[in-house]
């Protein structure tokens, strides 16, 4: 499972691009091919996202809280959908976050386990 920013150009190696943000990215049209499939329910809750604020000092606690959210619906159902997509072929998780390493993407890659 690959990762990148939603603002990156589409690559032939991307497979299915999946936007994993709760909020639609600025400057991106709904039909933009850089988005692909939007799974907003797999993203961290608004409450968790706002608490975290991509603060590196909170990253470990963020990952713990986010993993807990992924066990409950609707996130659990969206995670199942992501796993199904990954079983069908290459998937690239995309986010609008500037630093993908501090986003939910690394946690999703670990938890999805495909």
Image (spheres, rainbow, N blue to C red):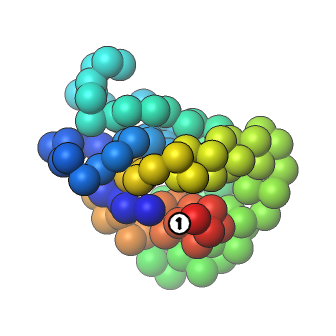
| Vertical placement of residue 8 versus 107, above or below | above
Q: Quadrant of the N terminus?
A: bottom left
Q: In which image quadrant can residue 111 be found? A: bottom right
Q: How many marks?
A: 1
Q: Estimate the x, y position of residue 54 in percent, counting from the top left.
A: 45, 64
**Is 90 positioned to the left or the right of 58 in the image?**
left
Q: Estimate the x, y position of residue 72 in percent, counting from the top left.
A: 84, 50
Q: Quadrant of the C terminus?
A: bottom right
Q: In which image quadrant can residue 110 be found? A: bottom right
Q: Residue furthest right?
A: 72
**Is 41 positioned to the left or the right of 37 in the image?**
right
Q: Estimate the x, y position of residue 40 in percent, counting from the top left.
A: 57, 36
Residue at 70% from the left image edge and 73% from the top image edge? 64
Q: Secondary structure at mark 1?
A: helix
Q: Estimate the x, y position of residue 34 in percent, counting from the top left.
A: 27, 36
| Residue 48 in view here | yes
| Residue 5 in view here | no
Residue at 52% from the left image edge and 46% from the top image edge? 88
Residue at 49% from the left image edge and 33% from the top image edge? 38
Mark 1: few, some, or many residues within 10 Å (few <14, many ≥20)?
Answer: some
In front: 102, or 81? 81
**Is 39 positioned to the left or the right of 61 in the image?**
left
Task: Quickly name the residue at label 1.
Answer: 109
Q: Residue furthest front?
A: 88
| Vertical placement of residue 102 versus 34, above or below | below
**Is 82 positioned to the left or the right of 53 in the image?**
right
């Amino acid at each position: 499972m690959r990762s990148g920013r939603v603002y990156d150009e589409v690559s032939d190696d991307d497979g299915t691009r999946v936007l994993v943000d709760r909020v639609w990215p600025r400057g991106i049209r709904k039909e933009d091919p850089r988005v692909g499939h939007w799974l907003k329910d797999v993203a961290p809750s608004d409450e968790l996202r706002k608490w975290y604020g991509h603060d590196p000092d909170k990253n470990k606690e963020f990952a713990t809280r986010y993993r807990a959210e992924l066990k409950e619906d609707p996130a659990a159902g969206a995670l199942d959908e992501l796993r199904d997509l990954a079983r069908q072929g290459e998937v690239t998780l995309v986010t609008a976050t500037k630093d993908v390493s501090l986003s939910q993407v690394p946690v999703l890659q670990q938890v999805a386990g495909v």
